[in-house]
Image (cartoon, helix red, strand yellow):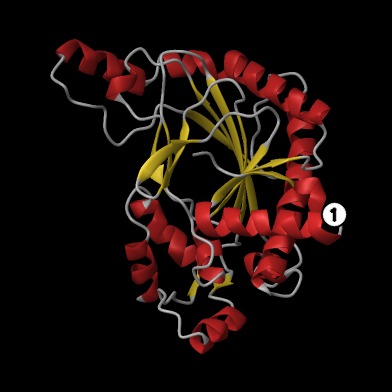
């Protein structure tokens, strides 16, 4: 079993070819919550530069601190005890966030220019993917984008998380990244094409997300589940660590602004009521309130988060 791999260029076509691609994306959103895009429009030359500068950044600016981190020392201590305990409530992950207005790693040649170009391309791809979701859901073009932007033209939160999962001397004692669903909107992941480790939960079974060169993985966050009135689900996923390789992961998040009001699309609620579908009722809330709850409950089931924000 493998997550869908979809030729995104066919969405720009017509006839049966386009209809098939649109149906594949609908299936990816409804049945999987994850799918991989090939022919997504981002130049391979740019993607190769992104790999290069991110790997160099880790070696130049991050690796030494990770090797000397409190987590590394805690893992060594735990391994020496040999009592079967795992290192809980931490992730074997070196991570930093890129925003338009925060401090970026300053020492890696070409990093800022390359990642700024990449982020601009990813944001355009996210908006194109959302338009496809709008069409598949029967919503007007730009609906999801407008909700996530709080009604403003460009007021979303667009962040890029650069992660590395270095070789682990005791992978059986620590998580790479604990299982969770993503809080926000549309997530675009450029994962390592050599070192695996990403898994999603599908029908009670953990499934590897196969590394494929220069694909972009799309997954839907909690807010897309709400807006779609449950048609699209945010999916549990995790990262396993290994004693081999240094897994690179670059995840970009097209998330709502903190002031954005999130609610199921009225058209989809009316349709569900007409069809008398038995479905979860999602609340209307401000995204900033949801994030306050998510910060404390990220690695816990999502349904109590929806219930908690209902009471805010």
Residue 312 in view (yes/no): no
Q: Quadrant of residue 79?
A: top left
Residue lying at the far front in this picture: please name it.
Answer: 16
Residue 172 in view (yes/no): yes
Residue 312 horizontal/vertical position (percent): 38, 74
Residue 301 horizontal/vertical position (percent): 33, 55
Is 59 rendered above or below residue 7? above
Residue lying at the far left in this picture: please name it.
Answer: 83
Q: Nearer the viewer, residue 215 or 117?
A: 215
Please, what secondary structure does the residue beneath circle 1 have?
helix
Q: Name the residue under label 1.
A: 12
Q: In which quarter of the image is residue 206?
A: top left
Q: Nearer the viewer, residue 309 or 279?
A: 279
Q: Nearer the viewer, residue 35 or 72?
A: 35
Is 12 rendered above or below residue 142? above
Residue lying at the far bottom in this picture: please name it.
Answer: 274
Pointer 1 local density, CA inside 10 Å: few below 14, some 14–19, many at least 20: few
Residue at (55% x, 33% y) in the render: 96
Residue at (60% x, 26% y) in the render: 192
Determine whether, in the image, residue 312 is placed left or right of residue 55.
left
Q: Quadrant of residue 101?
A: top right
């Amino acid at each position: 079993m493998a997550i869908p791999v979809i030729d995104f260029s066919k969405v720009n076509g017509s006839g049966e070819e386009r209809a098939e691609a649109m149906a594949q994306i609908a299936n990816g959103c409804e049945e999987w919550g994850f799918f991989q895009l090939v022919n997504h429009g981002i130049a391979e030359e740019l993607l190769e530069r992104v790999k290069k500068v991110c790997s160099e950044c880790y070696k130049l600016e991050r690796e030494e601190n990770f090797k000397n981190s409190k987590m590394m020392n805690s893992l060594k201590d735990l391994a020496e005890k040999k009592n079967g305990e795992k290192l809980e409530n931490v992730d074997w992950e070196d991570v930093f966030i890129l925003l338009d207005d925060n401090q970026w790693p300053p020492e890696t040649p070409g990093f800022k220019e390359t990642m700024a170009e990449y982020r601009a391309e990813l944001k355009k791809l996210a908006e194109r993917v959302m338009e496809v979701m709008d069409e598949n859901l029967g919503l007007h073009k730009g609906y999801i984008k407008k909700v996530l932007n709080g009604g403003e033209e460009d007021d979303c939160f667009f962040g890029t998380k650069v992660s590395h999962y270095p070789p682990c001397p005791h992978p059986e004692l620590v998580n790479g990244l604990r299982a969770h669903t993503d809080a926000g909107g549309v997530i675009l992941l450029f994962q390592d094409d050599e070192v695996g480790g990403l898994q999603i939960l599908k029908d009670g079974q953990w499934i590897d997300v196969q590394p494929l060169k220069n694909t972009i993985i799309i997954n839907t966050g909690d807010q897309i589940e709400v807006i779609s009135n449950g048609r699209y689900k945010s999916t549990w996923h995790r990262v396993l660590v290994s004693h081999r390789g240094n897994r690179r992961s670059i995840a970009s998040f097209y998330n709502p602004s903190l002031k954005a009001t999130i609610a199921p699309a009225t058209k989809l609620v009316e349709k569900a009521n007409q069809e008398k579908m038995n479905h979860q009722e999602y609340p209307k809330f401000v995204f900033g309130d949801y994030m306050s709850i998510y910060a404390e409950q990220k690695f816990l089931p999502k349904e109590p988060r929806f219930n908690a924000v209902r009471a805010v």
